[in-house]
Image (cartoon, rainbow, N blue to C red):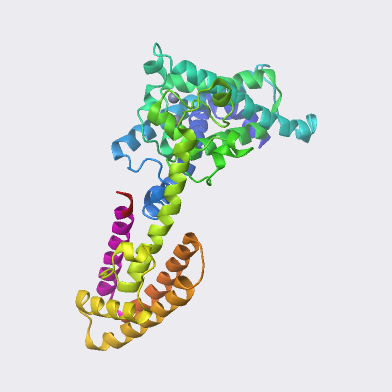
Amino acid sequence: MRPIIENIGYQFGPGLAWLLTSVFIFLRYAIPASLVFLLIYKWKRKAWLERKIQQKFPKTAQLRHEIAYSALTSFIFGGMAIGIFILRKLGYGELYFEIEEYGWGYYIFTVFFMIAAHDTYFYWVHRLMHHPGIFRYFHLVHHQSTNPTPYTSFSFHPLESVLEFAIIPILTLVLPVHASAFFLFTLWSILFNVLGHTGYEISPSGFTRHRFFKWLNTPTHHNMHHRYSHYNYSLYFNFWDRVMGTNHPEYDRQFEEVVRRVKRGAKTGVAACMMLLSTCSFAQMSLKDIQNGNYGSPEYRAHQIDSAMQVGLALRKDQITPVHTINLRYSKRVEEEVVKPKLSDWSKYRRLMKIQKEKDKELQSVLSSSQFEKYKNKRDAMFWEGIKAYFY
Ligand SMILES: [Zn+2]
Ligand SMILES: [Zn+2]
């Protein structure tokens, strides 16, 4: 590894080295950002809706804008990274390659030191970029995303990219840093950034008031910065915002609001699932009834689902009995495993989802593929409606 890193500028020539480093930096942004995006904006879009801080989704034009600027940022970061190696070759800079040179204690210290130094540097440079005199030349591009996505994390104007990265060569000029410690620091930076821009809250209730955790920033914290602009400037830690009094006064309250929505969402999820499993989405019961625990008997639910499926899916004669057997068996299972036990809403929701999967498998063996497709679409639409009815 050492000769490749050390001689990168010489082996490939500075131009190609710049290109390769930039592509590497871009991929290190694009891969985690895309994985997170696919997971929560596509795959779990419905299931995790209640975790979405702003209850709307960005348009494709915003994503295109973010990815284009992020590619540009990668080239600038790449150029500056090559600059660091070239400086080192010329005798400037303290990058080293043998851990034994300074030992493990020092190695770990440098990782934490770089994170803390970057956090402080970023806070003040960020506040500076919000100065009305320079805001639009440096920082406007990043703030064009008022509802950030994982792709926003590298979406900077070139001038902002240079300013943000400037701390890195400065650090390597004054502090001996192992090449891999440097890599770890940048990895932490990009992962934290992607998480902070997801637009989804994952921390539990009470996080922003906890003795230790309150010092760590949450996705809600940075999301509010994109929304309100003149608060919440800090990057990794909620240190400088607390010291300088620049935390948004509504931060704790808005954070709890999202978290509470997650709890309520679980309840809605339970209700909607009960509806699907009990009555096959052609529900005779109202969402309210189910939320209040009025599910009816398992036999009643099985009967409802039987007749709804017969009509809705035009069941053939030979399908009626097997479908009834499945419906009754699963209604009874729901009774025993979900309705009767005292469980949290989340556990009920998870159990229902599991039961639903198993039931789907059995139904698939009885229904034709088009019937099953129709059943599934109707059910999913109903689930979505149930969630929406609760929020809007
Ligand atoms: Zn941001
Ligand atoms: Zn800003």
- What secondary structure predominates along the stretch shown in magenta? helix
In the image shown, does 271 or 49 lie closer to the viewer?
271
Q: Give 90 or 365, whichever is nearer the viewer.
A: 365
Q: How many marks?
A: 0
Relative height, residue 233 to residue 184 (above, below):
above
Quadrant position of residue 34: top left
Report x, y in % for residue 191: 53, 39
Question: Where is residue 92 drawn, in percent x and y?
Answer: 67, 16
Q: Is residue 1 at all visible to an observer of this figure?
A: yes
Any magenta on residue 380?
yes
What residue span does the magenta drawing correspond to? 367-389
Q: Relative to residue 341, is residue 120 depicted above or below? A: above
Asked if 89 appears above or below 287 in the picture, the reply is: above
Residue found at the very far top of the displayed protein: 133
Q: Is residue 151 left or right of residue 237?
A: left
Lateral position of residue 103 relative to residue 25, left or right: right
Q: Name the image quarter holding the N terminus.
A: top right
Where residue 196 sits: x, y (%)?
Answer: 49, 37
Quadrant for ligand 1 reads top left
Is residue 27 visible in this depiction of the protein?
no
Going by the image, does 287 lie left or right of 235? Answer: left
Residue 18 belongs to the span the image colors magenta:
no
Q: Nearer the viewer, residue 207 or 145?
A: 207
Q: Write the residue at 47% across / 33% down.
A: 251
Q: Which image quadrant for residue 108?
A: top right
Residue 299: x percent and y percent?
35, 82
207 above or below 278? above
Please tell me which residue is depicted at 42% across the width and 48% down the height of the picture: 261
